Structures are given as structure tokens and as C-alpha cells.
Image (tube, grey):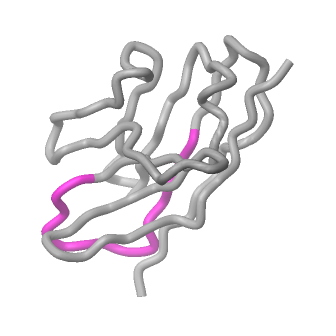
């Protein structure tokens, strides 16, 4: 019954910024991680930025220092702030919330980085 609704994707020039958001329709018990994955054409879906509750974070090496994952508990929302975007960041970005043995996924939002 839980749904994750994403927004914030779009077209941005190299060096620009975007902020993705993901809002859960309801509470999820026993959350382990919250974060973002991405899938580029011809590639597997891969972890980008993960929040390990309550405050620990892990980032894919290529986005460290450029991307920031955060959450707003009052809004049931997780964010991905993306700065200094590069063409290789272009992909479909998926929100993920992991409970003990259950994964919840958003539908994905397209990020295009091009001049």
C-alpha cells in the first residue's frame, strides 16, 4: 500500500544543480536505509546516495562532495541535492526505502545533463 512519489528531475547544463524529492504515502516501520539509486542506458541500477538511519550516509565515489542525501521527517520526504552535475550523471533516478526485508521503490525521475 505504500507509495513513493518522486519529483525534481529535468534538464540541466553541466555544472548546474537539481534537487530531487521523494515522499512516502505513509509511515514505514523498521526502516533500515533511505536513499537514491540511478540507472543509465545500458547499465545496471546502482546505489548513489544512501542514508543509514538515523544519520550515517554513504555515497558512490563519483558523487562524493557533489551530492547530498537528506530527509524531512515531518514531510515523510527524502531529498537528493545534486551539484556540479556532469554528463555522466544523466540517468533515471529512483528513490528507495528499505525496511528489514522489504524494499519500496519510486517510479523514477529522469535527469538529463547536456549543454
Is 67 one of the magenta-colored residues?
Answer: no
Left or right, 95 with reference to 99 = right
In this view, 69 is above or below 8: above
Rendered location of residue 76, percent (x, y): 38, 58
Left or right, 92 with reference to 38 = right
At 45% from the left edge and 73% from the top edge, which residue is drawn? 25
- Outermost residue toward the front in this view: 42
| Region rendered in magenta | 20-33
Quadrant where the N terminus lies? Answer: bottom left
Quadrant where the C terminus lies? Answer: top right
At 20% from the left edge and 68% from the top edge, which residue is drawn? 99
Q: Quadrant of residue 52?
A: top left
Rendered location of residue 50, percent (x, y): 30, 42
- Outermost residue toward the bottom in this view: 1
Is 24 one of the magenta-colored residues?
Answer: yes
Q: Nearer the viewer, residue 9 or 29?
A: 9
Left or right, 62 with reference to 28 = right
Rendered location of residue 87, percent (x, y): 69, 23
Q: Quadrant of residue 64?
A: top left
- Outermost residue toward the right in this view: 115
Count of numbered labels shown in the rendering: 0
At 48% from the left edge and 37% from the top edge, which residue is drawn? 80
In this view, 79 is above or below 89: below
Rendered location of residue 34, percent (x, y): 30, 52
Amino acid at each position: 500500500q505504500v507509495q513513493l512519489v518522486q519529483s525534481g528531475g529535468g534538464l540541466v547544463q553541466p555544472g548546474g544543480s537539481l534537487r530531487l524529492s521523494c515522499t512516502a504515502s505513509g509511515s514505514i516501520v523498521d526502516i533500515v536505509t533511505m536513499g537514491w539509486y540511478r540507472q543509465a542506458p545500458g547499465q545496471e541500477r546502482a546505489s548513489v546516495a544512501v542514508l543509514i538511519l538515523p544519520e550515517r550516509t554513504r555515497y558512490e565515489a563519483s558523487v562524493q562532495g557533489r551530492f547530498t542525501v537528506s530527509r524531512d521527517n515531518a514531510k515523510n520526504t527524502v531529498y537528493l541535492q545534486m551539484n556540479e552535475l556532469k554528463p555522466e550523471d544523466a540517468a533515471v533516478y529512483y528513490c528507495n526505502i528499505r525496511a528489514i526485508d522489504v524494499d519500496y521503490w519510486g517510479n523514477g525521475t529522469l535527469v538529463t545533463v547536456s549543454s
